[in-house]
Image (cartoon, helix red, strand yellow):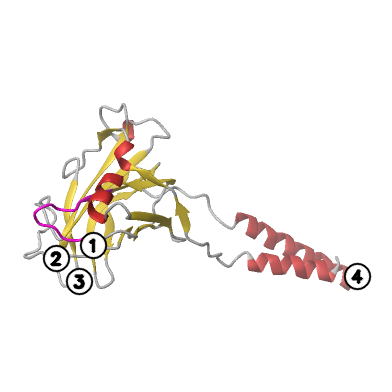
């Protein structure tokens, strides 16, 4: 075998072993106001996970209420009984600086402090099974941010989803008229439970709360092709050496 060809095959094989970093992918926002949803999944704490956004000092920064819904037409949403290919819509209502009552497993902070100029809402985990559909309530965003405000949505290279404020006024604490904004995203994966972490942040601090976590997608074992190339390269190298010995 030609030495140069063998070297090229080996080089490409070794390079393929290293992970490739992808850029964040921008998504087109869908208006939650126009969605038609079916029944919600009823989990251990009910159809909604009601919890608090808490900072590193154990202070409340706001409220987080989440639920997972089946498509329109479903009168009940029980994942083991749902047909294959069912799309699940994860819905999250975020309210800065105001904390409503929580479900029993989730403690209510002793005090909630103002949380102003909130600039971002994000998932603290890979959005497993994400189907590239995500958005927020345009009407609620306009109420909180003004007519010039919106959210840019990205999926990072680690699979996390991020909604970032663009333009408009500040998303602030308003105790008399709470500025709740509803976010959503869709996936092929039902939740495994309320083990997900959701985060709201501004330029100075952030608060996190628990919410539904999708079951991971079963992945096909990776590097099978790479292992095959390695085997071929090794075999070709052995054949080359044997030819040399015969000479």
Mark before the other along the chain sequence, 3 or 1: 3
Q: Which disc, if any, is residue 56?
A: 3
Q: Which residue is mark 4?
A: 246
The number of discs equals 4
Return the residue nearer the eye: 215 or 184. Answer: 184
Residue at figure coordinates x 44%, y 48% from the top left: 28
Residue ranking furthest to the right: 247
Q: Is residue 177 magenta?
A: yes
- 153 above or below 16? above
Mark before the other along the chain sequence, 3 or 4: 3
CA distance separating discs 3 and 2: 15 Å
Return the residue nearer the eye: 109 or 138. Answer: 138
Question: Which element type, helix, strand or loop, lies under badge 1?
Answer: strand
- 162 above or below 77? below
Mark before the other along the chain sequence, 2 or 1: 2
Q: Position of residue 85 (x, y in %)?
A: 43, 35
Mark 4 or 1, closer to the camera: 1
């Amino acid at each position: 075998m030609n030495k140069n060809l063998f070297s090229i095959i080996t080089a490409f094989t070794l390079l393929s072993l290293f992970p490739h970093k992808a850029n964040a992918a921008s998504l087109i926002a869908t208006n939650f106001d126009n969605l038609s949803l079916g029944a919600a999944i009823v989990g251990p704490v009910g159809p909604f996970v009601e919890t608090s956004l808490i900072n590193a000092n154990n202070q409340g920064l706001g409220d987080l209420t989440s639920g997972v819904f089946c498509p329109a037409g479903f009168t009940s949403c029980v994942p083991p009984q749902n047909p294959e290919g069912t799309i699940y819509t994860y819905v999250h209502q975020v309210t800065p600086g105001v904390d409503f009552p929580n479900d029993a497993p989730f403690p209510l902070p002793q005090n909630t402090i103002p949380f102003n100029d909130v600039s971002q809402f994000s998932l603290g985990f890979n959005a497993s099974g994400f189907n590239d559909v995500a958005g927020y309530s345009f009407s609620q965003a306009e109420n909180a941010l003004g007519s010039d405000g919106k959210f840019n949505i990205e999926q990072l290279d680690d699979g996390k989803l991020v909604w970032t404020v663009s333009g408009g006024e500040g998303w602030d604490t308003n105790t008399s008229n709470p500025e709740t904004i509803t976010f959503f995203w869709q996936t092929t994966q039902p939740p495994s439970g309320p083990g997900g972490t959701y985060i709201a942040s501004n330029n100075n601090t952030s608060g996190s709360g628990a919410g539904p976590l999708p079951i991971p997608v079963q992945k096909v074992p990776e590097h099978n092709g790479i292992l095959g190339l390695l085997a071929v390269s090794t075999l070709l190298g052995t054949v080359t050496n044997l030819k040399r010995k015969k000479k």
